[in-house]
Amino acid sequence: MKNVLDKLNWRYATKVFDNSKKVSKEDLNILLDAARLSASSYGLQPYHFFVIEDSEVRSKLRKASWNQSQITDASYLLVLANKPTFDDSLVDNYIDNIIETRGVTKKDVEGYSQMMKGALLGLPDEQKKSWTSDQTYIALGNLMTIAAEMEIDTCPMEGFDKAQYNEILGLNDKNLNASVVLAVGYRADNDETQNYPKVRYSKKQIITHI
Ligand SMILES: Cc1cc2nc3c(=O)[nH]c(=O)nc-3n(C[C@H](O)[C@H](O)[C@H](O)COP(=O)(O)O)c2cc1C
C-alpha cells in the first residue's frame, strides 16, 4: 500500500489520456461524492458540477480549450461551475436543508441565517463571483487527491474560454459560470510528462514556522 505522499508524487497533471481505458461508473460516483463532501464557506455550496461525456459537446469544448486533447480523451470531463451571483435564496435553501437534515427548527437557525445574509448579500457582484468561484477549487483539490488515492489520473484545467463554455453548456440561463475543469481518466503510456520530476519549492522556501 503506497503512502499518501507516494500517491501525491504519483499524480501529475496528465497531458495525454489513454482513450481506450475508461474509469468505471462506480469510481466516478466515488469521485462525485468526494466533490459533494467538500467543505465550503458557511457550508453554502454555491456551485454545480457537470459530468460531460457527450462526444459532440466535448469536441466543441476542446475548441474552446486551446485544442487541449485531455478535453476529449479523458474518460470524463468535469466542469465545476460557480454561481456568479446570488440572493437570499442561496442562504434560505441551505437553511431549509439544515432544518431537514438535522431536525432543528427555523428559529434555531435564524441567527445563523441572518449572519450569513449580513455578510454576503451586500457584497459587490465581482466579489460574489470570485468568492463562489473560490469554493469550486476546494472541490477541485479533493477530486484530484481522492482520484490519486484511487490511482485515477486527472488534469486540472483553467486553459479554456469561460464565455464559450458558458455558451456551449447553456450556463448563463442557469446563473452558472464555468470556473474550473477537471479531466478524469487514465494516463497514456507515452505521456512523457509522467516521468518529469516534480518542480516544487523546498519546505524551507515556502513554509515558515512561527
Ligand atoms: C487551477 C489549475 C489550472 C491548470 N490548467 C491547466 C491547463 O489548462 N492545461 C494543462 O495541461 N495543465 C493545467 N494545469 C496543470 C499545472 O500546470 C500543473 O498542475 C503544475 O505544473 C504542477 O504539475 P503537477 O500537477 O504535474 O505536479 C493547471 C493546474 C491547476 C491547479
Image: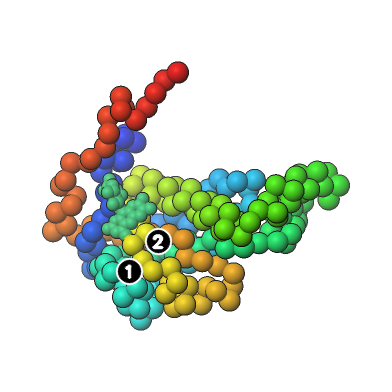
**Disc nearer the start of the sequence (2/1):** 1
Looking at this view, name the residue that lies furthest to the right: 107
Residue 197's x, y, as percent?
A: 18, 41
Q: Is residue 189 above or below residue 141?
A: below
Q: Is residue 118 above or below residue 49?
A: above
Residue 155's x, y, as percent?
A: 32, 56
In this view, the residue in front, 120 or 190, is: 120
Crowding near pointer 1: few (<14 within 10 Å), some, many (20+)?
Answer: many
Q: Answer left or right for 88 relative to 31.
A: right
Confirm or reject: label 2 Cβ below 8 Å from ligand 1: yes
Q: Is residue 203 above or below residue 183?
A: above
Crowding near pointer 2: few (<14 within 10 Å), some, many (20+)?
Answer: many
Q: Is residue 184 visible?
A: no
How many angstroms separate mark 2 from mark 1 (CA)?
Answer: 10 Å
Q: Amino acid at mark 2?
A: Val
Q: Answer left or right for 50 relative to 122.
A: left
Residue 206 in which image quadrant: top left
Residue 1's x, y, as percent?
A: 30, 36
Q: Secondary structure at mark 1?
A: loop
Q: Secondary structure at mark 2?
A: strand
Residue 17 in which image quadrant: bottom left
Count of all numbered marks drawn on residues in the image: 2
The residue wearing badge 1 is 65
At x 75%, y 45%, the residue is 115
Say which mark, if any, is on residue 120: none
Confirm or reject: label 1 Cβ below 8 Å from ligand 1: yes
Disc 2 + disc 1, Cβ < 8 Å = yes
At x 51%, y 51%, the residue is 134
Q: Is residue 161 visible?
A: yes
Say which mark, if any, is on residue 181: 2
At x 26%, y 71%, the residue is 67
